[in-house]
Amino acid sequence: MSMNLNLTLKVWRQKNSNDKGHMETYEARDISTEMSFLEMLDVVNEKLALEGKEPIAFDNDCREGICGTCGAVVNGIAHGPQKATTLCQLHMRHFKDGDVIYIEPWRSKAFKVVKDLIVDRSAFDKIIQAGGYVSVNTGQAPEANNIPISPEKAELAMDAAACIGCGACVAACPNASAMLFVSAKISHLALLPQGKVEASERTLSMLRKMDELGFGNCSNERECEAVCPKEISIANIARFNREFIKANLGSTVE
Amino acid sequence: MGWFIKNFSSSIGKKQIMAITGLIFCTFLTTHLLGNLSIYGGKGSFNSYAEHLHSLGVLVNVAEVFLIIFAALHISMAVVLYFQNLSARPVRYVKKKNAGGRTISSTLMPYTGLIILIFVIAHLINFHFADHTNQTIFDIVSNVFSNPIYVISYVFVMIVAAFHVKHGLWSAFQTVGANHPKYMPFIMAISLIFSLIVVVGFASIPVYIFSSI
């Protein structure tokens, strides 16, 4: 049954990347439990706009949990308290009347705050550019069933490919490490025959880019796996570690 | 040689050095514990174990040199990783909660590691560098553990070491890529059991010596 909530929001406000930023308190009145978290923010923003104040800036696009654009740390947990859920798919029924909700942007040296809750995640794009692809010569499309792939491998690759690149893993990691994201990309390509060809070059070059961009080091805290909206497993990180050994000691790639 | 330095100074490279040296320390703990347990056979049995060990001569020195190298690698990597990880998040969260991945053991890794380091230095001073001319190793051990402060601090550090080993052991497997849906539950269980063996095995000795004096 629908109910209305009155909430207190503590939101990170920051004008631009040079601004120091601070937490600000807002009252959110008459919030329906059927609203999504972002719809709740829309309501707060409408009120702010009517009052002539600057609305809270946040990233969002599909609002269906599939694009990876939205995300904020809600009460200390990336994407909020609901497991396997993006912020846009988090509903207000998971909150109680009178709750105080802290809303902060992803925190990482590699993700600069652009404004309020919006961070620049182009570091992820740079990692993909470093090797997150399969080189294909142009020409006729190859016959799809030429190379047999076991359903088990296809499933594992699909599980890794479910990563939407939202950055929650980095936000949740006590070390701001990007290992879950990078390992998901490494895995979904390394598991398939088409991706195996360039596996060693890819592993080393994506790893070096990740380090260069200032992400932290993995210490197997498993916080990434716990907040991932697509439930990407740390088994992918282990695969990345194996691929590293293969590339480092078992290939001619330097 | 360039590739060697480049790859082992990468984030995964450093972690794998931590993992391998950590696993070596786990095997060291095992042999150390097996040796120490000979104390339950009495004074003669313990002293004879020490004599047999030292009769290996230069092999003991070689092992010591390797242990020092591994310790230097493990500690230097830990320090570098710790500070890199701190700097990877320059602005902290106002409110941060665990989402269910972290454990006490994983959270405290750098701190339990530091306590173990301080302990190892004190431990070497207590026993290894103690005056062995007029007393047997059993006498030295009995002397040290006749002091309740030593007994309590040794037991405390063994609890700390168990926490370090509980996360460290499975984490080392994960870091070298040994994560498999069939074996992972087994590796997790071994980590817990091994850490319990460490605390019960090592910490029982000072308590036993103290209570039998």
Image (tube, rainbow, N blue to C red):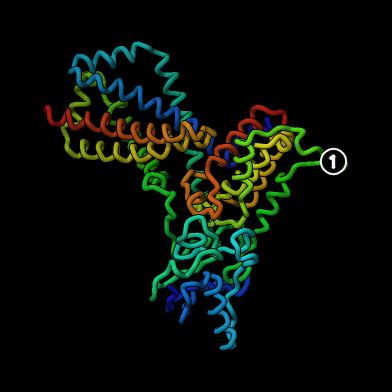
Q: Residue at x 33, y 32 (%)?
A: B193
Does the image show residue B88?
Answer: no
According to the image, label 1 marks what residue? A137
Answer with the quarter of the image where residue A67 lies. bottom right
Could you tell me which residue is drawn at 48 percent across and 28 percent down?
B69
Is B24 placed left or right of A72 in the picture?
left
Q: Is residue A14 above or below residue B14?
A: below
| Image mark count | 1
**Label 1 crowd (10 A; few <14 / some 14-19 / many >=20):** few
Amino acid type assigned to the residue bearing label 1 in the image: Asn
The residue that appears at 36% across and 38% down in the rendered structure is B116
Q: Give x and y (percent) for residue A101.
A: 44, 70
At x 27%, y 23%, the residue is B36
Taking depth in this image into account, of A96 and A220 the one nearest to the observer is A96
Name the residue furthest right.
Answer: A139
Tell me if A248 is positioned left or right of B77 in this view.
Answer: right
| Quadrant the C terminus of chain B occupies | top left
Q: For numbered disc 1, what is the local secondary structure? A: loop
Out of B171 and B133, give the one closest to the viewer.
B171
* Residue A140, position as x, y percentages in the image: 87, 41
